[in-house]
Amino acid sequence: MRFTPELTLADESVILMEVTASLRLFGGIRALRSQVRRIVARACGGEPESPPVLAVAACGPAAWMLARSGRGGSALGVRSLARALAQVPLDVAPPARPFAEWFQELGCATLADLRRLPRVGLKKRCGPALLDWLDRLDNVPARYRWLTPPPAFDAALEMPDHIEHAPALSWAVQHLVRQLCAWLAARQLDAEALTVLLGHDRIRPDGAGAGQSAPAGRSAAAAMPAAMPPGHLPQGRTTALDIGLGAPSRDPESLARLVRERLNRLVLPASVITVRLRATQLRAAQAPSLELFPEPGGAPRDHARLLELLAARLGAENVLVPAPVADHRPEQAARWAPLDPRGAGARAKETPGALPRPAWLLDAPIPLAVRGHRPFHGTPLRLVSPAERLDCGWQDGGPVVRDYFVAEDEAGACYWIFRSAGSGAEKGSDAGPTLQWYLHGLFA
């Protein structure tokens, strides 16, 4: 459904897609075919025993016939379509199957042979349904009931066996994430928050704990998980993983990687028998960027995705972001808080025309030595800015009176230093030998 909203589930495991309006968006029919083929192959698990057949034709019934015959291919012109249909076995057409034995006795094996027979005789012996089917193959528009995606996404998978370790659930989550992204594309939405629910084994009356082997009646030959409709999660304990995204997204790779990082850090309290994925917060999809040149250092969306990945890998409590407080004292104003992944894209506002502040503020000021009546840090420091008086803190019992300067060493590195106020030193003047200087920050 990411390629067209006009899609229907036809008979005999055939999916019909009307892609006329999507050709320009995806770069033509060949590019669209290759993308659809990759998506279908990925949904089938890579290399299935019977790979799906992809056929392109000018009308739905003709595409259905080419796909069901196993030949596939592309037949968009009148002549190419006639040649392709002429080689299709007759038993592929549903209206012709009840008369397969009669056609075999006549030596009629393909649609080309069927078209050579007189229409009047076919109508008397087979009825009008077969002729109507043949007419619909000749580029006659057919009406279909297009598939409508559900209003909310809530999908679950039942595991083929009890899963004891969370990383082993990655393949199931990846399968659900692909479904989610296709649903988001069909509804033109982006996900802002997801919830992964891990259903544990139900507690049995005999007192057996979760995570033990299944009963003898349980089949162990299941090779693929069974899709479960919403509301059918087996009753039992569940573990919920709430995942917030730094930037709205519907990219399957980034979403699956984010969920995998959370699973790698999770210790299961019991074995898992079901996995469910819900989209809890959504927003309208944003149009792609039309900027001619990419933003240096990456777009804000890339920065938000990096933060959400770090939070998933290290834990949100271990990723700190600036949370400044309205206080003139630097050590009080510079606060850090755990990352909220849902607000990872937000950045602290900068005050226009603010005084110079260092990129790195030390946890505590460091006393500096004084040599030659000048503060010393590796080399003698030279004051390159006027004094900035800081006189505050009296309201909460922590008064501070300081004079801050920007100082430069012999190599050109800049530092943020201060001294106790009231000494009368100005820019470029020599401080007294007993004056104590402190290093409080470093400029980038």
Image (cartoon, rainbow, N blue to C red):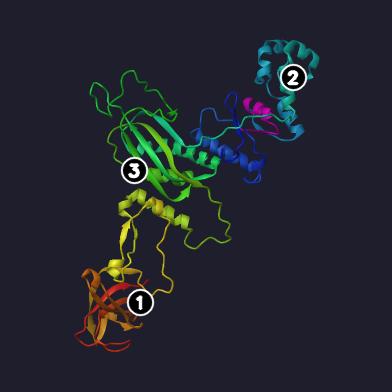
Residue at image location 75% in from the left, 24% down from the top: 135
x, y percentage for residue 210? Answer: 27, 29
Is tag 1's residue or tag 2's residue first in the polypeptide sequence?
2
Compared across the picture, whether 39 is left or right of 311 comes to: right
Q: Is residue 65 magenta?
A: yes
**Tag 1, which secondary structure?**
loop
x, y percentage for residue 182? Answer: 52, 39
- Mark 1 lies on residue: 413
Q: Is residue 255 above or below residue 415?
A: above
Compared across the picture, whether 82 is left or right of 416 comes to: right
- Mark 3 lies on residue: 264
Q: Is residue 61 magenta?
A: yes
Of residues 415 and 344, which is closer to you in this image?
A: 344
Which stretch appears magenta?
A: 54-69
- Tell me the quarter of the image containing the C terminus: bottom left
Q: Amino acid at mark 2?
A: Leu
- Mark 2 lies on residue: 131
Q: Is residue 221 above or below residue 351?
A: above
Residue at image location 35% in from the left, 54% down from the top: 339
Q: CA distance from mark 1 to mark 2?
A: 88 Å
Mark 2, residues whose alpha carbon is within 10 Å: few (<14), some, or many (≥20)?
some
Of residues 118 and 210, which is closer to you in this image?
A: 210
Q: Decide if residue 377 is in sight here.
A: no
